[in-house]
Image (cartoon, rainbow, N blue to C red):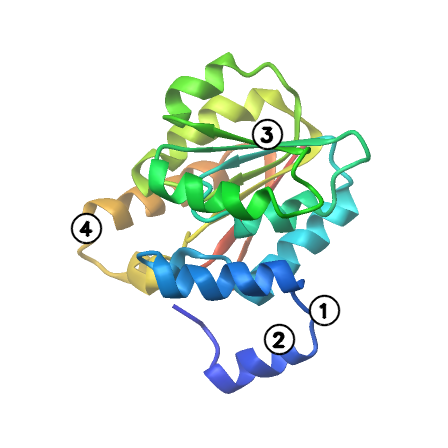
């Protein structure tokens, strides 16, 4: 769901830095060949993630939910010279698609795509994260937050995508996914370890800064 008109979105994109040719092709091929292409971050959100990453200059980025690799490639743009991005996803088919584009990028040696369940993998990772992007199964957002928060450096960012869930979080009767997102929003907003900012960019981005 977009919270501005198509024309205003196009205007914003026209006055935003362009996608690389690789990202344009990834965007196009995702829409042509992969199910649920609306899951892709896209031009405006992708540039926003890249912008934040470049401001943070992270050494270690964690992404939970790879899909076709668009957001990983955007986030990798801000990595330090020896930085690493670890992205985790259980979907073998989309992982193969993502890997095919990651291998074409200048960040191929900085991105490590792990196939599997993040709930199992995260406890095995010992890095201290500078930037975490959560864009996976909504019912486990709170679980992922709990698994990573102690490993995030002071001043580090955690960003959760789709936290407005097409506006469904305003409904009185919520389905399970919507209720999970609403409960996550309440959970992190009341967590004294982070500062919170919820932005209506595309389907909602919750930006959390570790104190």
**On the picture, is 94 further left or further right than 110?**
left
Q: Nearer the viewer, mark 1 or mark 4?
A: 1
Whole-number angstrom distance, CA of label 1 to CA of label 4: 37 Å
Q: Earlier in the sequence, mark 1 or mark 4?
A: 1
**Which dot marks residue 13?**
2
Residue for badge 4 = 175
Q: Position of residue 118 (x, y in %)?
A: 41, 26
- Helix, strand or loop at disc 1? loop
**On the picture, is 67 further left or further right than 43?**
left
Q: Earlier in the sequence, mark 3 or mark 1?
A: 1
Q: Earlier in the sequence, mark 4 or mark 2?
A: 2
Q: Residues within 10 Å of mark 3 (few under 14, many from 20)?
A: some
The answer to whether the residue labelled 3 contacts the one labelled 4, judged by CB atoms less than 8 Å apart, is no
Can residue 91 be seen here? The reply is no
- Helix, strand or loop at disc 4? loop
Q: Position of residue 32 (x, y in %)?
A: 38, 65
């Amino acid at each position: 769901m977009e919270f501005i008109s198509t024309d205003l979105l196009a205007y914003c994109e026209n006055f935003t830095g362009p996608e690389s040719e690789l990202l344009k092709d990834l965007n196009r091929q995702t829409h042509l060949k992969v199910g649920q292409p609306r899951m892709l971050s896209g031009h405006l959100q992708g540039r926003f993630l890249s912008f934040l990453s470049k401001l943070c200059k992270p050494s270690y980025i964690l992404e939970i939910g790879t899909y076709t690799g668009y957001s990983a490639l955007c986030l990798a743009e801000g990595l330090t010279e020896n930085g690493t991005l670890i992205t985790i996803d259980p979907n073998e088919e989309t992982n193969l698609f993502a890997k095919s584009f990651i291998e074409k990028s200048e960040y191929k040696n900085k991105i490590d795509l792990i196939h599997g369940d993040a709930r199992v993998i995260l406890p095995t990772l010992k890095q201290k994260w500078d930037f975490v992007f959560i864009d996976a199964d909504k019912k486990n957002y709170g679980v992922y937050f709990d698994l990573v928060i102690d490993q995030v450096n002071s001043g580090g960012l955690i960003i959760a995508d789709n936290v407005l869930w097409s506006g469904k979080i305003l409904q009185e009767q919520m389905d399970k996914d919507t209720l999970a997102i609403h409960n996550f929003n309440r959970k992190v907003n009341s967590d004294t370890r982070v500062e919170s900012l919820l932005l209506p960019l595309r389907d909602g981005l919750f930006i959390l800064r570790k104190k």
